Image: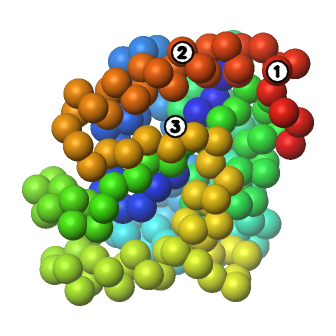
Amino acid sequence: MIIGLTGRNASGKGTVAQWLTRRGFVYTSLSDAIRTWLREQGKEPSRDNLIWAGRTLRSQSGPGVLAERTLTALPPGQDALVDSVRNPAEVEVLRRRRDFALLEVCAAESVRYERLRARGRAGDAANLEEFRRQEQAELASGDAAAQQLVATAALADCRVDNNGDLAALESQLENLMAQWRVTLGAPSQRPQP
């Protein structure tokens, strides 16, 4: 099966990814294709450069290009996690696989901002105003090549609420895993895209 992750910045996608990899999922990220391209261009993988490069690649090769590149690189016969799904066209490409489900990780702005400050990752917003500005640029766009988190989230097959503690999140994930094993493990039960 393939589980795609989407969600706003600092919602806890990394925590969900770690949980899935501990259960044998092979990790990949659509952003990996962008980072590779940035290295080839001699540019740093800053948040702004990642957004710009993603838009550039989608404009040049179509809005689903990152998902297409990722699907061809996935190891056959293994459960996989695809992180950083940020455009509806990427979901369409990933849905070519009958064993794909998109999971949205949700958390309130205040929770996400506190997590962002605590993690101290390079390229993260320096203050709440910048955090909001960055997020606004990712939510919606008339440009098919841009990030469109709202439209992507609307395509999610399931959601987890990550406003609580780790135990609450893991409980939700355990329940989802049981469902995925039944529905994604039996393609005839999966609705056709």
Q: Left or right: where does residue 76 sit relative to residue 163?
A: right
Q: Amino acid at mark 3?
A: Thr
Identify whether 13 is placed above or below 129: above
Q: Left or right: where does residue 57 sit relative to residue 120?
A: right
Residue that numbered label 2 is attached to: 178
Of pointers 2 and 1, the one earlier in the residue sequence: 2
Residue that numbered label 1 is attached to: 189
Q: Quadrant of the C terminus?
A: top right
**Residue 190 quadrant:** top right
Front residue of this view, candidates 157 and 116: 157
Q: Residue at x 69, y 74 (%)?
A: 145
Count numbered badges in the picture: 3
Q: Amino acid at mark 1?
A: Gln
How crowded is the residue under tag 3: few (<14 C-alpha within 10 Å), some, or many (20+)?
some
Tags 3 and 2 touching, CB below 8 Å: no
Using the rendered image of the protein, determine whether residue 138 is visible from the camera's viewpoint: yes
Per the model, the C-alpha gap separating discs 2 and 1 is 15 Å
Residue that numbered label 3 is attached to: 28
Is disc 1 placed on a helix, strand or loop?
A: helix
